[in-house]
Image (tube, rainbow, N blue to C red):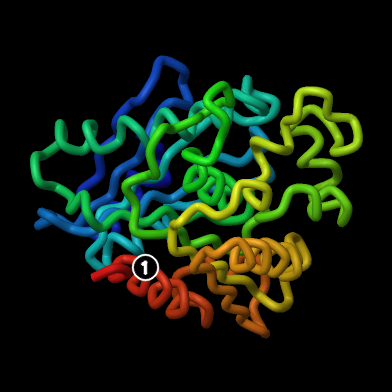
């Protein structure tokens, strides 16, 4: 078990389990839950870090513990990253595999632990990209990495300061070439069409309610990245909302106790209740 999750769970009196979805060392999911969990909504957290190996799920432990403290079962998925066997297509395949098998893994932990009808994907920064992409897998060609035949069984996506539009991110130079390193190509030199199957902005409409929550002072992933995605999604017919917190930066959105955190909780609640 990841030590930061173990510590966060112990401090808050939460249940902590780790489940595996594959053989690689990164094919793991940290699960935090209230001690009396049963039939709770599930929030699947996908961490950021510009898809790079040096950033793992550990930095989401306080965020996940705070969500579990508010009554959610929280599953933080790990995946292979650039520099550690990840990148295209491995990172995408890992996220797809984790999400597809997670309901079964949670049932094996405890039947009825979560309410399978109330599932939200939450991703921050590059994790926001992965959450949006995961919600669009049914829009992929059948031969594309991570293709899913049917829409994902989720209530919505909460994209926190997400790298929501890959071509925009490249043009803006985000992360010192992070997108190009992740996909192994620049948009103008992409013979395999990787951007077409990895950029969420090119896979709308998804039919999945989405909230893009962004800080107006974000210098790591400027708010315009989320704005161009949200505009494209709405034009395609999706129920996508951009919520801008003018005085917040990149990291306050994943910092419990910050002035941004109540807005994260509200957006999560709004999505959990979507369609009811």
Q: Quadrant of the N terminus?
A: top left
Examine the image and state in which quarter residue 35 appears: bottom left
Q: Is residue 140 left or right of residue 27?
A: right
Of 140 and 73, which appears nearest the observer?
140
Q: Is residue 184 left or right of residue 103?
A: right
Q: Is residue 195 visible?
A: yes
Of 131 and 218, which appears nearest the observer?
131
Q: Is residue 116 left or right of residue 62?
A: left
- Image position, residue 118 (x, y; %): 25, 58
User: Which residue lies at the image location 28% right of the left edge and 49% below the top edge?
Assistant: 32
Secondary structure of the residue carrying numbered label 1 = helix
Compared with residue 164, is residue 249 higher up or lower down, i.e. above or below?
below
- Image position, residue 12 (x, y; %): 27, 61
Compared with residue 87, is residue 76 higher up or lower down, i.e. above or below?
below
Q: Quadrant of the C terminus?
A: bottom left
- Image position, residue 37 (x, y; %): 13, 55
Residue pointed to by mark 1? 271
User: Which residue lies at the image location 67% right of the left edge and 68% below the top edge?
Assistant: 231
- Image position, residue 55 (x, y; %): 61, 41
**Total numbered labels placed on residues in the image:** 1
User: Which residue lies at the image location 80% right of the left edge and 55% below the top edge?
Assistant: 168
Specify few, some or many for label 1: CA neighbours under 10 Å numbering under 14, 14-19, or 20 or more.
many
Examine the image and state in which quarter residue 179 appears: top right
Of 189 and 128, which appears nearest the observer?
189
User: Which residue lies at the image location 72% right of the left edge and 70% below the top edge?
Assistant: 223
Examine the image and state in which quarter residue 141 appears: top right
Q: Is residue 14 left or right of residue 131?
A: left
* Residue furthest out toward the top: 23
């Amino acid at each position: 078990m990841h030590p930061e999750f173990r510590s966060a769970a112990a401090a808050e009196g939460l249940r902590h389990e780790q489940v595996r979805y594959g053989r690689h060392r990164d094919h793991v999911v940290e699960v935090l839950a209230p001690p009396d969990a049963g039939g709770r909504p599930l929030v699947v957290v996908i961490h950021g870090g510009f898809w790079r190996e040096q950033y793992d799920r550990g930095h989401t432990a306080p965020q996940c513990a705070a969500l579990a403290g508010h009554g959610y079962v929280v599953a933080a998925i790990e995946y292979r990253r650039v520099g550690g066997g990840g990148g295209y297509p491995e990172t995408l395949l890992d996220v797809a595999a984790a999400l597809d098998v997670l309901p079964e893994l949670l049932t094996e932990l405890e039947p009825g632990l979560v309410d399978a009808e109330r599932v939200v994907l939450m991703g921050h920064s590059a994790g926001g990209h992965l959450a949006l992409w995961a919600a669009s897998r049914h829009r992929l060609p059948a031969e594309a990495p991570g293709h899913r035949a049917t829409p994902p069984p989720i209530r919505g996506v909460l994209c926190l300061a997400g790298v929501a539009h890959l071509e925009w991110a490249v043009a803006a130079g985000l992360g010192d070439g992070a997108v190009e390193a992740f996909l192994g190509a620049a948009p103008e030199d992409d013979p395999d069409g990787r951007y077409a199957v990895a950029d969420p902005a090119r896979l709308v409409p998804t039919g999945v309610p989405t909230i893009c929550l962004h800080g107006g002072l974000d210098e790591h992933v400027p708010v315009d990245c989320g704005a161009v995605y949200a505009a494209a999604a709405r034009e395609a017919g999706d129920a996508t909302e951009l919520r801008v917190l003018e005085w917040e930066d990149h990291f306050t959105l994943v910092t419990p106790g910050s002035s941004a955190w109540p807005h994260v909780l509200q957006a999560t609640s709004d999505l959990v209740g979507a369609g009811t």
